[in-house]
Image (cartoon, coloured by chain):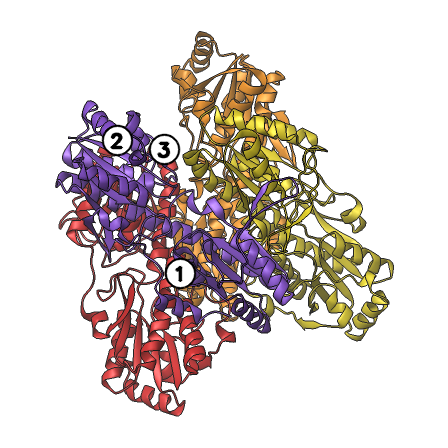
Chain colours: A yellow, B orange, C purple, D red
Amino acid sequence: MRVGVLTGGGDCPGLNAVIRAVVRKGVTDYGYDFVGFRDGWRGPLEADTQTLDIPAVRGILPRGGTILGSSRTNPMKIEGGVEKIRENLAKLEVDALVAIGGEDTLGVATRLHEHGVQVVGVPKTIDNDLGATDYTFGFDTAVNIATEAIDRLHTTAESHRRVLIVEVMGRHAGWIAIHSGMAGGANVILIPEQQFDIEQVCGWVESRFRTNYAPIVVVAEGAVPLDGQMVTKDQSLDAFGHVKLSGIGDWLAAEIERRTGHEARTTVLGHVQRGGTPTAFDRWLATRFGFHAIDAVHDGAWGQMVALRGVDVVTVPLQEATRELKTVPPSLYDEAKTLFG
Amino acid sequence: MRVGVLTGGGDCPGLNAVIRAVVRKGVTDYGYDFVGFRDGWRGPLEADTQTLDIPAVRGILPRGGTILGSSRTNPMKIEGGVEKIRENLAKLEVDALVAIGGEDTLGVATRLHEHGVQVVGVPKTIDNDLGATDYTFGFDTAVNIATEAIDRLHTTAESHRRVLIVEVMGRHAGWIAIHSGMAGGANVILIPEQQFDIEQVCGWVESRFRTNYAPIVVVAEGAVPLDGQMVTKDQSLDAFGHVKLSGIGDWLAAEIERRTGHEARTTVLGHVQRGGTPTAFDRWLATRFGFHAIDAVHDGAWGQMVALRGVDVVTVPLQEATRELKTVPPSLYDEAKTLFG
Amino acid sequence: MRVGVLTGGGDCPGLNAVIRAVVRKGVTDYGYDFVGFRDGWRGPLEADTQTLDIPAVRGILPRGGTILGSSRTNPMKIEGGVEKIRENLAKLEVDALVAIGGEDTLGVATRLHEHGVQVVGVPKTIDNDLGATDYTFGFDTAVNIATEAIDRLHTTAESHRRVLIVEVMGRHAGWIAIHSGMAGGANVILIPEQQFDIEQVCGWVESRFRTNYAPIVVVAEGAVPLDGQMVTKDQSLDAFGHVKLSGIGDWLAAEIERRTGHEARTTVLGHVQRGGTPTAFDRWLATRFGFHAIDAVHDGAWGQMVALRGVDVVTVPLQEATRELKTVPPSLYDEAKTLFG
Amino acid sequence: MRVGVLTGGGDCPGLNAVIRAVVRKGVTDYGYDFVGFRDGWRGPLEADTQTLDIPAVRGILPRGGTILGSSRTNPMKIEGGVEKIRENLAKLEVDALVAIGGEDTLGVATRLHEHGVQVVGVPKTIDNDLGATDYTFGFDTAVNIATEAIDRLHTTAESHRRVLIVEVMGRHAGWIAIHSGMAGGANVILIPEQQFDIEQVCGWVESRFRTNYAPIVVVAEGAVPLDGQMVTKDQSLDAFGHVKLSGIGDWLAAEIERRTGHEARTTVLGHVQRGGTPTAFDRWLATRFGFHAIDAVHDGAWGQMVALRGVDVVTVPLQEATRELKTVPPSLYDEAKTLFG
């Protein structure tokens, strides 16, 4: 059996750990050959491959990024893309694919499976917003990075009596915000799932100042205020004609300053959250995902992907990855609210 | 309602996060008063208390240890211990207890509950060996510390072509060993659940050297070789008449050197694994355990303890904490074995 | 002898370590009493004090911030400020002051010394731009935080072929930028001391892409392009009427995108760089500064401050702290340039 | 010009950073070719080489260990070793050598220089005990690792009222012990330079317990008690006939328990201190050492090595590396003693 492996979509700590586990177990236990496809679906589309054997995966376990490269190339949006991939797989004598990626990458995998390609999936989203699995690798690393930043901001917040705002990842789901906010002891946490009332936010800020401590606000990039409170999150032009995308963190700082009179400063963690060495949990989860993915190949469980349920790694249909977004439940947000202000 | 809180048994990152969450939610949502009992069960036994209010728990979330102190005092082994505790609780007008601790502490809580004391439990074990919950706080921190040590040993192992052995915690269960070993890319992992064959270990060591890399062996403190391979893990006296407890890590190093001729060195991480600031996951879990424990008090769920099941915190009877040891299942150890050698 | 201690200006990891060392050595070796003044010069100005003895400094060594609080209150700008301070010191029976702070705080100390106040100084600047000392505490911590961020960005830069820009502290001197940029393997480092040519920056960026790797640009907040390249670093208004301060990092990203067509993203580390636990070096330096400051009090070395020269802590006149800004020498920037592109 | 590079002796974070800087600057600024010699002096002795160009040094800056391998091979102890090296250098058309290593490696370099080999040195010792330079790379990393371990032990020490002992590296000099001990807030620091009185150590331990806190003792591996207090640091045999080397940390624990009745536990950090990613300072210093070493080659400064003096990298004769051991001066140890007990 000859198995192709590819990684698609955004960067995520643990991708290399998955690749290594797939190859190590595939070679050792099943005697498979492997082919690395470069840059996500661009690889099989253009028959762009690289050597993928045990020496190639040595030492990559603790490294961020992906040795296979990544891209957002979508063969479904390319005329004849599916046929091209089938041809290339046949030409390269690749019997099966392990596709590691998020909603888009696994959506393509689902379609290819419907066209008869033998594929299994490994879910990946740093935002932890895939419904089919309890957790995805990379998330724990992002949460720890954000928490460490919040830890560091606490002392400055106190010494200077300023409002400090941390904008973290999470376009559609507030998992990173709520986990890091609770772990870091934030005084306000704002998530995309719940429109916030800027007046209430200012109330929590004022309430915190009354305890003689300064407030820390954690905001997911996708959080939005109540309708009407932000005229429109428009693109403005700066003095040099550059487009200025005003992030929610900056908006919050300006608005809190205007309404409360307290100085406010924003840190946007950005890409720092998704690079570098994965935490132990993410390596563990990624390694186990890799093992179970190659087991699924061995079992001929085409069209399936691996998922974490409690402490068990199981397989579920690929469609589950894209069926629904896993968002922060209101009950959990209510728990966190106990600590606001 | 007046609620007493105590922490018993060994140190574990996250204890303070539990205490803080119990108090913050108890005061804010339920209007409870709190009393801190000092040094585990010694506190209620001797009516030794300390102030426990919102100012007292400020800033403790990221700190290791426990502001309440701990001990292994067991009132069940003290004549009239139970009565003394009941008297003191009455005298101090304490209506309910939140007991945070491991098998021993919760065992006492179970007995007190049988004697009519209103108590709820929060499970604690750095070894992650309680059957009633998927994970306990402190474990993730210990695994990350051990993994970081293994990461650092890799470069030295390679540069010097030595066998490097890391002895980690785990007297009865190999959870820390298997998680950190898999996350750190160890070449051999030895756990208490499976007696090891020293000859097979030496085989894996030799096999690793043939790849031009040096092997790293992770061993749980409770791991043992096959019957007969270690004459007896006896106490020897050193030249100064001191008792020398020969740990399994040291034994392994000596035995591997003797059998393979390769130099071997052991690092015993010891208490470093159980101190200091908790990881984001442990703070998150400890905080949620604290919230649900005080909810259980509010619900009058006496004799119950909180537990993690998947992503949910639930309550289960206290007896479950002590019913059976949660050990590493053979199937998981087999997964790990794929990477040995 | 009764000694007052105060901390002024911006937050800096190591302030607490200085306070602890001053008090521990002052009590143990010299039998002094201490008074903590709150919030920098506001403390002696308003006779606002707090207890400062050995129990008060217990456990603060690894903590960021300052237990004495800080402010930018400048008694020189307050009518009768100096007299008020002299009165309050007399009333509180404070014989001498240890003033820990940067250019402003030590400038006030210099003036007070000229008015007969017995004061010694401890220099503090996270930017490392004081001419009188080889290094100041807090700087090493900031550099390590920035370097860790750069490390994490490397993998993302590579996976996505984007230009990643990190804006670090340094208004007037590029020490943090050049240290973290060299330690992190940045491809371009821009500092306030040398106006940069945006065309040359784009050339380095393009050159890096030709090696099949993506570039990382580290820019000090005070760096500026050649005259005329940035029309004016003006304040623009966003769609909501908020003032938008366009930082140099954001400007660079927009300008590089416009000129090269490569996507660029900026991370502004902000206050994360100056909070949290200090590195070992900063604790060591801060502790030694504290020891030598109280020795200077004992020696009656009024008007002096401590400074690091090589591996030795020495005392120098307070004026040296404010005499000249220590900037990155051109020869060092030329060394760093070897690695550009 | 064709330049050979080798690394000798023990592992040390920063070796790769030196190699990278030498090659990057040598190629970019001077147009040199490079040859990597494998495993220290064994490389030129056996003409064992590897490719060393810009692609070969890509990505190695943050990695521990050395891509060239290391060994303790000493050509001076091999019949005809010097001639063999001269022959091989001629045969490989290597004009000059950059030797990176400690006392032994640089001692060989000195001798080869006397025999006409064009060599420059880069000093390396994790113990920081070379007299010719203020600091060596790797030391700061080791100190930070030891300090973080001490931080973690503090909470356990307090919770359990135990004496916790940390044995750190330092056979002949106590630099790691005194830096990490002071940075970590240890209560006793023992170094090779000053024989300790075990009775005085027990006095400090008892004194610490009287403050209601538990003591932490940092001991360099080379520290020894007063003559007569330790009968002999002999080798004992354990029950299985294995040689048991009793380290000073274990001896201290046993002796403190015996004399004070307090429980004592030892953590031996071992190789963990010398592996893994270097701190920002060590990468900075190693990079600058590399730059200046290749400058020295360009200047024909044969027989010289680079060294740090204050903030400047200078060149000094190779002999200075081996002239005298740099030990902790009594005045510095006295500073540290202020905090004992």
Residue C275 visible, this angle: yes
Q: Are marks 1 and 3 in contact (CB under 8 Å)?
A: no
Q: In this view, does B304 lie above or below D209?
A: above
Nearest the camera: A178 or D16? A178
Q: Characterize the local packing of mark 3: few (<14), some (14-19) or many (20 or more) Cα atoms within 10 angstroms.
A: many
Alpha-carbon span between mark 1 and mark 2: 43 Å
Are the residues under badges 3 and 2 in a single subunit?
yes
Q: Residue at x 71, y 39 (%)?
A: A327
Q: Where's the N terminus of chain B, which quadrant?
A: top right
Q: Where's the C terminus of chain B, which quadrant?
A: bottom right
Q: Is residue B210 above or below residue D85?
A: above
Q: Which residue is drawn at 50% across and 74% down?
A: D56
Q: Characterize the local packing of mark 1: few (<14), some (14-19) or many (20 or more) Cα atoms within 10 angstroms.
A: many
Q: Is residue A134 above or below residue C260?
A: above
Which mark is first along the chain, 2 or 1?
Answer: 2
Residue D326 is labelled as: none
Kindly state the secondary structure of the residue where label 2 is placed: loop
Q: Name the residue under label 2.
A: C54
Alpha-carbon span between mark 3 and mark 2: 18 Å
Subunit bearing disc 2: C
Kindly state the secondary structure of the residue where label 3 is placed: loop
Percent across and percent down for residue D286 are 37, 66
Which mark is first along the chain, 3 or 1?
Answer: 3
Percent across and percent down for residue D142 are 35, 55
Look at label 3 and name its amino acid: Gly
Are the residues under badges 1 and 2 in a single subunit?
yes
Of marks 1 and 2, the one in the foreground? 1
Alpha-carbon span between mark 1 and mark 3: 32 Å
Image quadrant in which you'd find residue D130:
bottom left
Q: Name the residue under label 1.
A: C193
Image quadrant in which you'd find residue A253:
top right
